[in-house]
């Protein structure tokens, strides 16, 4: 098989004042932020674009471009392709694997100014929106039409739909509505040479050869820049409820999942797992209101169950029957729990789960592993990681403070977080390749929903065969022979 | 002289079922967002989920906390609501939080929402009924705790009217409540502009709750199950001799004018010109 070595395929060129002069011919002055002449901005203005929100990855870009139209994106890429200037597409910059920040001095192409809804069909529920639309504002846009976005994440207030699609983000509604590979109906993509690939169809069914758009979903901006998305939004559920259950042992999670699935069937919309450490951290950092001391006593972990359905009475009856069954069982799977009584409590219960990410960041420096492993191994993976770090003498105040697990049980997706006092090379060495080897042993995925970014390129072989990686490189070469698109991400 | 035997408290907590609108999907904690005016412009859109008025939730919590603090001195906590059959859910929530029993004054689903004066009169009737029948002072209701206002109509007068009708002490906008049942006194810190005002009142008393008084607890599953078995007495307006025919007419409810986004100007001159155009 022919091999394309893309690790350092071509020497990329830094952006110069000459390039800026060209960009200013078709971009408005407000669309260019650069430390270069003629209107140098301060480093501070560039800083938010150069680093990720966790402060783990830092680039050295001198120039951020914020085009307002697809045509402008095309002009930018055409020029960069000819000049071999690296380009990092950036949405809300909320990623967790350093995929949206430059590794060197590439241009940051921010999609924030492409932020208009192009159309919405209230009958079919198909929404066509610019890539820079913020997820939450799209949720608000379709809400009056009684629809919701098929995707929901903790970062919804900042993340952009283009970034969601480019990274194939998963999130909290995946159990119910499936992945973006299913809900995205069409894309508009600007290819590295400036060609605009218009596949912005609104068809549910379209079996006409290769489904090219799928390649861009999860490509993390390495094949082209997504400028617009056509997505199928489901009808809004008329009633939602949630309950958080305290479990005496992790061993009960799987039997509980089976019971809950059987009794709630079509109204089950989330089944989330939070271990005790994650719960305690969320509470410590004010994410949602804590359960009472009595309720959490003796709980090893927690499960959040959400229902969404068409009729309140029906859903509440089902949920109530389930809870009664759980509490009255001879050997109860749950100690106790809390059922939300109002929208405020509904939010507060969700905040306990969604706030874990933020709580971990507030507590210290986070090493985040987002892995798919068999459900039965969740606890083992977390406990073994903790023991592994202990055996290396790294489990103390000045190194690793907490090892915690939470995630989407329904999707077999565990978020394994290691919260440290500081990012230290010895911690990094203790965690990798250890965790990747564990995942590989279970035939799991090293990145269930966060992507590869800059963080996991070296670890790709733990989840993908050599043949697969070879093919991925060929595809990359077809779309981006100059290697300008998001260099250093996904593929080494 | 006051009898030396400890006085027992019977607390009545009136609760209202209010609409929370589309909040349940947007997971916001702010109650105020996304309230929509109904098409007839006579009120807000109420075709949505109902749950307990948040200020009333605080009232229930405070009653339960008083019991936790004063133990057996709090003899009963009774929740009461006036509403259609569905409002029984709100009473179940109050019972799950720790109320002992409840009264449901049932009205028709389609009828108008009772006005504050009628609500206050209903509460007075309930209190007089119970206190009139009481053979022992220990069975009399002597504390009423309710929200300072409902978040749907924002009228905020029921507590004051009730205290006036009964001739009881009133402590409104409470952010701290202490009751000395032996002395028959309540010390209440009230929210006022720029600070707090501490007042001492004689029981019986009507207390209305403000936001900072406490943070209501979740209803735990075992307590929700227990609440299903707690007694709810059903009464009709006729039983209490109350007429809910409205005396107020809402002429129009309108949303605030939409804010229009600002614009950027490139220079001072342009700014001055724009200001002139705007007639400033």
Image: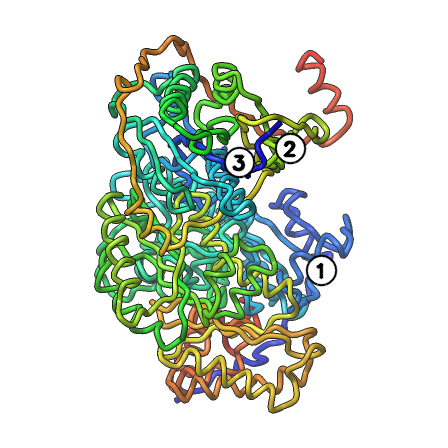
Camera-near label (1 vs 2) is 2
Q: Circle 2 sits on which residue?
A: B187
Protein chain holding label 3? B
The vertical placement of A346 against A434, above or below, is above
Measured as percent of width and height from the top left, residue B6 is found at: 55, 39
Q: Count of labels shown?
A: 3
Camera-near label (3 vs 2) is 3
Identified at 41% across, 65% down, the residue is A246
Chain-order first, disc 3 or disc 2: 3
- CA distance separating discs 1 and 2: 64 Å
Measured as percent of width and height from the top left, residue A7 is found at: 56, 81
Q: Secondary structure at mark 2?
A: strand
Q: Secondary structure at mark 3?
A: loop
Quarter that holds the C terminus of chain B: top right
The vertical placement of A186 against A218, above or below, is above
Q: Circle 3 sits on which residue?
A: B7
Query: Which of these two is toward me, B138 or A165?
Result: B138
State the residue lying farthest toward the bottom. A391
Protein chain holding label 1? A
Query: Which of these two is toward me, A346 or A22?
Result: A346
- CA distance separating discs 1 and 3: 76 Å
The vertical placement of A474 against A307, above or below, is below
Quarter that holds the N terminus of chain B: top right
Do pointers 1 and 2 mark residues of a single chain?
no
How many residues crowd mark 3 within 10 Å: few (<14), some (14–19), many (20+)?
some
How many residues crowd mark 1 within 10 Å: few (<14), some (14–19), many (20+)?
many
Inspect this view and state whether residue A435 appears: yes
Measured as percent of width and height from the top left, residue A104 is found at: 67, 70
Measured as percent of width and height from the top left, residue A334 is found at: 36, 67
């Amino acid at each position: 098989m022919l091999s394309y070595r893309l690790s350092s395929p071509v020497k990329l060129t830094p952006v110069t004042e000459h390039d800026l002069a060209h960009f200013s011919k078709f971009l408005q002055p407000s669309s260019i932020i650069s430390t270069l002449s003629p209107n140098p901005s301060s480093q501070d203005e560039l800083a938010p674009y150069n680093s990720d929100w966790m402060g783990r990855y830092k680039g050295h870009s001198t120039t951020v471009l914020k085009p307002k139209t697809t045509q402008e994106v095309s002009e930018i890429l055409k020029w960069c392709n000819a000049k071999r200037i690296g380009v990092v597409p950036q949405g809300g910059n909320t990623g967790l694997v350093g995929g949206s920040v430059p590794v060197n001095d590439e241009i940051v192409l921010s999609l924030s100014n492409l932020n208009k809804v192009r159309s919405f069909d209230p009958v079919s529920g198909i929404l066509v929106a610019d890539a820079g639309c913020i997820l939450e504002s799209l949720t608000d846009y379709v809400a009056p039409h009684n629809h919701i976005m098929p995707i929901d994440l903790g970062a919804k207030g900042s993340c952009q739909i283009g970034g969601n699609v480019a990274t194939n983000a998963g999130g909290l509604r995946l159990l119910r509505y499936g992945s973006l590979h299913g809900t995205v109906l069409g894309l508009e993509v600007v290819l590295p040479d400036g060609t605009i690939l218009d596949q912005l169809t609104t068809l549910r069914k379209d079996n006409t050869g290769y489904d090219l758009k799928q390649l861009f979903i999860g490509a993390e901006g390495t094949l082209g820049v997504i400028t617009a998305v056509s997505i199928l939004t489901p009808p809004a559920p008329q009633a939602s409820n949630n309950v958080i259950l305290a479990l005496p042992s992790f061993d009960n999670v799987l039997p509980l999942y089976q019971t809950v699935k059987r009794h709630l069937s079509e109204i089950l919309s989330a089944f989330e797992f939070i271990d005790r450490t994650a719960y305690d951290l969320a509470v410590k950092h004010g994410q949602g209101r804590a359960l009472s001391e009595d309720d959490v006593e003796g709980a090893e972990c927690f499960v959040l169950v959400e229902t969404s359905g068409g009729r309140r009475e029906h859903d509440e009856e089902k949920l109530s029957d389930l809870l009664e069954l759980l509490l009255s069982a001879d050997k109860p799977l749950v100690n106790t729990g809390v059922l939300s009584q109002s929208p405020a409590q509904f939010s507060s219960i969700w905040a306990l789960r969604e706030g874990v990410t933020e709580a971990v960041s507030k507590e210290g420096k986070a090493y985040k592993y987002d892995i798919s492993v068999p459900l039965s191994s969740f606890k083992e993976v977390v406990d073994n990681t903790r023991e592994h770090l202990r055996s290396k003498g790294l489990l103390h105040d000045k190194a690793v403070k907490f090892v915690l697990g939470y995630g989407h049980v329904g999707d077999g997706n565990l978020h394994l977080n290691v919260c440290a006092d500081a990012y230290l090379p010895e911690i990094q060495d203790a965690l990798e390749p250890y965790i990747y080897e564990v995942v590989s042993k279970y035939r799991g995925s090293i990145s269930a929903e966060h992507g590869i970014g800059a963080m996991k390129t070296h670890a790709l072989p733990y989840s993908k065969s050599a043949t697969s990686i070879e093919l991925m490189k060929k595809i990359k070469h077809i779309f981006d022979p100059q290697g300008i698109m998001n260099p250093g991400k996904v593929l080494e | 002289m006051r009898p030396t035997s400890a006085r027992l408290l019977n607390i009545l907590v009136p609760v209202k079922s209010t609409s929370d609108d589309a909040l349940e999907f947007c997971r916001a904690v702010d109650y105020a967002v996304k309230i929509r005016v109904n098409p007839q412009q006579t009120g807000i859109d109420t075709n949505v989920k109902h749950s307990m008025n948040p200020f009333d939730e605080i009232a229930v919590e405070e009653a339960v906390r008083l019991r936790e603090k004063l133990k057996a001195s709090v003899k009963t906590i009774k929740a009461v609501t006036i509403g259609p059959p569905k409002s029984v859910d709100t009473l179940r929530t109050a019972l799950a939080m720790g109320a002992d029993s409840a009264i449901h004054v049932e009205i028709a689903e389609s009828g108008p929402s009772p006005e504050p004066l009628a609500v206050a009169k209903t509460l007075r009737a309930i209190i007089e009924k119970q206190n009139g029948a009481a053979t022992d002072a220990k069975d009399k209701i002597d504390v009423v705790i309710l929200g300072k206002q409902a978040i749907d109509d924002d009228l905020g007068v029921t507590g004051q009217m009730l205290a006036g009708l009964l001739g009881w002490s009133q402590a409104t906008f409470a952010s701290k409540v202490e009751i000395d049942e032996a002395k028959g006194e309540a010390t209440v810190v009230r929210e006022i502009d720029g600070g707090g005002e501490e007042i001492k009142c004689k029981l019986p008393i009507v207390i209305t709750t403000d936001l900072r008084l406490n943070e209501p607890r979740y209803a735990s599953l075992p307590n929700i199950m227990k609440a299903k078995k707690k007694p709810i007495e059903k009464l009709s307006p006729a039983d209490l001799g109350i007429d809910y025919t409205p005396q107020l007419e809402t002429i129009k409810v309108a949303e605030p004018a939409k804010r229009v986004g600002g614009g950027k100007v490139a220079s001072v001159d342009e700014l001055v010109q724009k200001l002139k155009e705007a007639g400033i």
